[in-house]
Protein backbone atom coordinates (compact mmCIF):
# COMPACT_ATOMS: atom_id res chain seq x y z
CA UNK A 1 0.00 0.00 0.00
CA UNK A 2 1.25 3.47 -0.83
CA UNK A 3 2.63 5.31 2.19
CA UNK A 4 0.55 8.39 1.39
CA UNK A 5 -2.59 6.41 2.23
CA UNK A 6 -1.28 5.80 5.74
CA UNK A 7 -0.44 9.49 5.94
CA UNK A 8 -4.00 10.52 5.00
CA UNK A 9 -5.43 8.16 7.62
CA UNK A 10 -3.17 9.72 10.22
CA UNK A 11 -3.60 13.35 9.21
CA UNK A 12 -7.41 13.37 8.94
CA UNK A 13 -8.14 12.81 12.65
CA UNK A 14 -4.97 14.60 13.73
CA UNK A 15 -5.83 17.78 11.83
CA UNK A 16 -9.45 17.59 12.97
CA UNK A 17 -8.31 17.31 16.58
CA UNK A 18 -5.72 20.06 16.18
CA UNK A 19 -8.42 22.43 14.95
CA UNK A 20 -10.32 21.82 18.18
CA UNK A 21 -7.44 23.30 20.18
CA UNK A 22 -7.96 26.62 18.41
CA UNK A 23 -11.61 26.67 17.30
CA UNK A 24 -14.39 25.74 19.67
CA UNK A 25 -17.78 24.52 18.36
CA UNK A 26 -19.56 27.88 18.22
CA UNK A 27 -21.40 27.30 14.94
CA UNK A 28 -23.15 24.04 15.77
CA UNK A 29 -25.47 24.10 12.77
CA UNK A 30 -22.61 24.17 10.25
CA UNK A 31 -20.80 21.43 12.17
CA UNK A 32 -23.87 19.20 11.96
CA UNK A 33 -24.18 19.89 8.24
CA UNK A 34 -20.61 18.67 7.81
CA UNK A 35 -21.51 15.54 9.75
CA UNK A 36 -24.57 15.00 7.53
CA UNK A 37 -22.48 15.40 4.37
CA UNK A 38 -19.76 13.03 5.58
CA UNK A 39 -22.32 10.51 6.84
CA UNK A 40 -24.14 10.47 3.50
CA UNK A 41 -20.89 10.18 1.58
CA UNK A 42 -19.66 7.31 3.78
CA UNK A 43 -22.98 5.47 3.53
CA UNK A 44 -23.17 5.88 -0.24
CA UNK A 45 -19.57 4.83 -0.84
CA UNK A 46 -20.19 1.72 1.25
CA UNK A 47 -23.31 0.80 -0.73
CA UNK A 48 -21.89 1.61 -4.18
CA UNK A 49 -18.29 0.47 -3.76
CA UNK A 50 -17.66 -1.55 -0.61
CA UNK A 51 -20.57 -3.97 -0.27
CA UNK A 52 -20.29 -5.21 -3.88
CA UNK A 53 -16.70 -6.24 -3.08
CA UNK A 54 -17.82 -8.10 0.04
CA UNK A 55 -20.69 -10.01 -1.54
CA UNK A 56 -18.96 -10.80 -4.84
CA UNK A 57 -15.59 -11.89 -3.47
CA UNK A 58 -16.51 -15.56 -3.03
CA UNK A 59 -14.07 -15.83 -0.11
CA UNK A 60 -16.68 -16.15 2.63
CA UNK A 61 -20.12 -17.65 3.07
CA UNK A 62 -22.87 -15.88 4.98
CA UNK A 63 -21.29 -12.46 4.51
CA UNK A 64 -24.54 -10.87 5.67
CA UNK A 65 -24.13 -12.49 9.09
CA UNK A 66 -20.77 -10.79 9.54
CA UNK A 67 -22.28 -7.47 8.45
CA UNK A 68 -24.91 -7.87 11.17
CA UNK A 69 -22.23 -8.77 13.71
CA UNK A 70 -20.37 -5.60 12.77
CA UNK A 71 -23.54 -3.58 13.19
CA UNK A 72 -24.08 -4.89 16.72
CA UNK A 73 -20.38 -4.58 17.53
CA UNK A 74 -20.66 -0.86 16.85
CA UNK A 75 -23.71 -0.78 19.10
CA UNK A 76 -21.56 -2.19 21.90
CA UNK A 77 -18.69 0.20 21.17
CA UNK A 78 -21.06 3.13 21.60
CA UNK A 79 -21.50 2.12 25.22
CA UNK A 80 -17.84 3.07 25.61
CA UNK A 81 -17.62 6.06 23.27
CA UNK A 82 -21.02 7.66 23.97
CA UNK A 83 -21.37 8.42 20.27
CA UNK A 84 -18.02 10.15 19.81
CA UNK A 85 -17.61 8.49 16.40
CA UNK A 86 -20.75 10.35 15.31
CA UNK A 87 -19.04 13.65 16.09
CA UNK A 88 -20.75 14.07 19.47
CA UNK A 89 -19.13 15.34 22.63
CA UNK A 90 -21.66 15.25 25.47
CA UNK A 91 -20.40 15.26 29.04
CA UNK A 92 -22.41 14.63 32.21
CA UNK A 93 -21.19 15.58 35.65
CA UNK A 94 -21.72 12.07 37.00
CA UNK A 95 -19.06 10.54 34.74
CA UNK A 96 -16.56 8.33 36.56
CA UNK A 97 -12.90 9.49 36.42
CA UNK A 98 -12.12 6.41 34.30
CA UNK A 99 -14.53 7.66 31.61
CA UNK A 100 -11.68 9.04 29.50
CA UNK A 101 -10.06 5.59 29.38
CA UNK A 102 -13.24 3.85 28.29
CA UNK A 103 -13.78 6.50 25.61
CA UNK A 104 -10.23 6.08 24.32
CA UNK A 105 -10.57 2.29 24.29
CA UNK A 106 -13.85 2.39 22.38
CA UNK A 107 -12.80 5.04 19.87
CA UNK A 108 -9.47 3.30 19.19
CA UNK A 109 -11.18 -0.03 18.50
CA UNK A 110 -13.58 1.76 16.17
CA UNK A 111 -10.72 3.62 14.49
CA UNK A 112 -8.79 0.39 13.89
CA UNK A 113 -11.76 -0.96 11.92
CA UNK A 114 -12.01 2.36 10.06
CA UNK A 115 -8.57 1.80 8.59
CA UNK A 116 -9.33 -1.64 7.18
CA UNK A 117 -11.54 -0.83 4.15
CA UNK A 118 -9.13 1.65 2.55
CA UNK A 119 -6.90 -1.28 1.64
CA UNK A 120 -8.14 -2.52 -1.71
CA UNK A 121 -5.83 -5.40 -2.60
CA UNK A 122 -6.88 -6.53 -6.03
CA UNK A 123 -10.06 -4.41 -5.78
CA UNK A 124 -8.51 -1.06 -6.70
CA UNK A 125 -11.82 0.49 -7.74
CA UNK A 126 -13.13 1.40 -4.31
CA UNK A 127 -9.84 2.39 -2.70
CA UNK A 128 -9.70 6.14 -3.24
CA UNK A 129 -13.40 6.74 -2.70
CA UNK A 130 -13.33 4.79 0.56
CA UNK A 131 -10.18 6.61 1.64
CA UNK A 132 -11.80 10.00 1.04
CA UNK A 133 -14.96 8.83 2.83
CA UNK A 134 -12.95 7.71 5.84
CA UNK A 135 -10.95 10.94 5.85
CA UNK A 136 -14.19 12.95 5.95
CA UNK A 137 -15.40 10.69 8.75
CA UNK A 138 -12.19 10.95 10.77
CA UNK A 139 -11.91 14.76 10.62
CA UNK A 140 -14.95 15.48 12.84
CA UNK A 141 -14.17 12.39 14.91
CA UNK A 142 -10.76 13.78 15.87
CA UNK A 143 -12.33 17.19 16.47
CA UNK A 144 -14.97 15.71 18.77
CA UNK A 145 -12.36 13.74 20.71
CA UNK A 146 -10.31 16.84 21.59
CA UNK A 147 -13.42 18.86 22.46
CA UNK A 148 -14.58 16.05 24.75
CA UNK A 149 -11.17 15.83 26.43
CA UNK A 150 -11.34 19.58 27.03
CA UNK A 151 -14.79 19.28 28.58
CA UNK A 152 -13.37 16.59 30.87
CA UNK A 153 -10.68 19.08 31.98
CA UNK A 154 -7.85 16.98 30.56
CA UNK A 155 -4.63 18.99 30.24
CA UNK A 156 -3.83 20.27 26.75
CA UNK A 157 -0.52 18.40 26.64
CA UNK A 158 -2.23 15.15 27.62
CA UNK A 159 -5.00 15.73 25.09
CA UNK A 160 -2.40 16.26 22.36
CA UNK A 161 -0.65 12.99 23.24
CA UNK A 162 -3.96 11.11 23.26
CA UNK A 163 -4.89 12.65 19.90
CA UNK A 164 -1.53 11.62 18.44
CA UNK A 165 -1.88 8.04 19.68
CA UNK A 166 -5.47 7.83 18.46
CA UNK A 167 -4.43 9.10 15.01
CA UNK A 168 -2.02 6.18 14.66
CA UNK A 169 -4.74 3.56 15.05
CA UNK A 170 -6.48 3.83 11.66
CA UNK A 171 -3.17 3.41 9.78
CA UNK A 172 -2.56 0.33 11.94
CA UNK A 173 -5.90 -1.05 10.75
CA UNK A 174 -4.86 -0.50 7.14
CA UNK A 175 -1.58 -2.31 7.81
CA UNK A 176 -3.48 -5.24 9.31
CA UNK A 177 -5.67 -5.39 6.19
CA UNK A 178 -2.56 -5.44 4.00
CA UNK A 179 -1.12 -8.29 6.06
CA UNK A 180 -4.26 -10.43 5.87
CA UNK A 181 -4.58 -9.80 2.14
CA UNK A 182 -1.23 -11.54 1.70
CA UNK A 183 -1.65 -14.21 4.35
CA UNK A 184 -5.36 -15.03 4.51
CA UNK A 185 -7.80 -13.25 2.14
CA UNK A 186 -10.74 -14.99 3.81
CA UNK A 187 -9.97 -13.26 7.11
CA UNK A 188 -9.70 -9.95 5.27
CA UNK A 189 -13.16 -10.41 3.76
CA UNK A 190 -14.59 -11.25 7.17
CA UNK A 191 -13.06 -8.03 8.47
CA UNK A 192 -14.51 -6.18 5.48
CA UNK A 193 -17.98 -7.49 6.31
CA UNK A 194 -17.63 -6.53 9.97
CA UNK A 195 -16.53 -3.05 8.95
CA UNK A 196 -19.49 -2.86 6.59
CA UNK A 197 -21.79 -3.35 9.56
CA UNK A 198 -19.98 -0.69 11.56
CA UNK A 199 -20.26 1.74 8.65
CA UNK A 200 -23.99 1.07 8.30
CA UNK A 201 -24.57 1.82 11.97
CA UNK A 202 -22.43 4.95 12.18
CA UNK A 203 -23.50 6.51 8.88
CA UNK A 204 -27.23 5.94 9.35
CA UNK A 205 -27.08 7.20 12.93
CA UNK A 206 -25.44 10.40 11.70
CA UNK A 207 -27.99 10.77 8.91
CA UNK A 208 -31.11 10.33 11.02
CA UNK A 209 -30.09 12.36 14.03
CA UNK A 210 -31.65 15.80 14.04
CA UNK A 211 -31.27 18.99 15.99
CA UNK A 212 -34.76 18.80 17.43
CA UNK A 213 -34.75 15.10 18.24
CA UNK A 214 -37.87 14.71 16.07
CA UNK A 215 -36.03 13.21 13.07
CA UNK A 216 -36.97 16.10 10.77
CA UNK A 217 -34.64 17.04 7.95
CA UNK A 218 -34.09 20.72 7.23
CA UNK A 219 -33.60 21.79 3.64
CA UNK A 220 -29.94 22.44 4.40
CA UNK A 221 -29.50 18.94 5.77
CA UNK A 222 -31.28 17.42 2.77
CA UNK A 223 -28.94 19.37 0.50
CA UNK A 224 -25.88 18.19 2.45
CA UNK A 225 -27.04 14.57 2.32
CA UNK A 226 -27.85 14.86 -1.38
CA UNK A 227 -24.45 16.34 -2.19
CA UNK A 228 -22.67 13.62 -0.23
CA UNK A 229 -24.57 10.87 -2.03
CA UNK A 230 -24.09 12.51 -5.43
CA UNK A 231 -20.35 12.81 -4.90
CA UNK A 232 -20.16 9.13 -3.96
CA UNK A 233 -22.10 8.20 -7.10
CA UNK A 234 -19.88 10.31 -9.35
CA UNK A 235 -16.79 8.55 -8.00
CA UNK A 236 -18.36 5.20 -8.90
CA UNK A 237 -18.88 6.01 -12.59
Image (cartoon, helix red, strand yellow):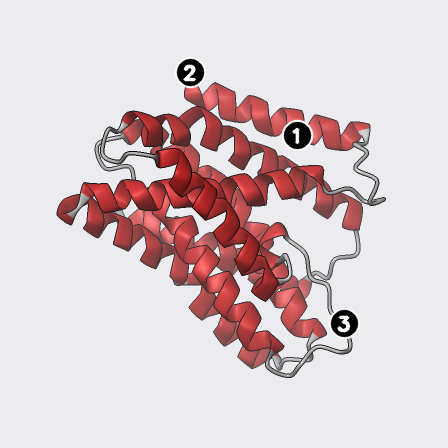
Mark 1 Cα within 10 Å, few/some/many (few <14, many 20+)? Answer: many
Give the residue number, with chain letter if any, for mark 1.
225
Q: Is residue 96 above or below residue 163?
A: below
The numbered mark, 2 or 1, whose residue comes first in the sequence reads 1
**Residue that appears at 52% across and 29% down:** 44
Cα separation, mark 2 vs mark 1, equals: 19 Å
Q: Looking at the image, is mark 1 or mark 3 earlier in the sequence?
A: 3
Above or below, comparing residue 197 to residue 13 in the picture: above
Residue plotted at (27% across, 30% down): 123
Disc 3 packing (10 Å; few <14; some 14–19; many ≥20)? few
Residues marked 1 and 3 touching at CB (< 8 Å): no
Q: Residue at x 34, y 28 (%)?
A: 55
Mark 2 or 3, closer to the camera: 3
Residue beneath disc 3: 92
Residue 20 on image: x %, y %: 64, 62
Indicate the secondary structure of the residue bearing disc 1. Answer: helix
Residue 52 image position (x, y, % from top left): 37, 25
- What residue would you read off at disc 2? 237
- The answer to whether 97 appears left or right of 74 in the picture is right
Amino acid sequence: MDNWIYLVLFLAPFLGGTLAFFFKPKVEGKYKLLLSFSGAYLFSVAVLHFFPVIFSSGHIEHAGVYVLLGFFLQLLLEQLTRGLEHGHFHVHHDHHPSFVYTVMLGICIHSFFDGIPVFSGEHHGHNHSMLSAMALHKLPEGYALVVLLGLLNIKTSTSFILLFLYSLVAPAGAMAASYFDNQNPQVLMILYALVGGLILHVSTTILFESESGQHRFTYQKIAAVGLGSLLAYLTSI
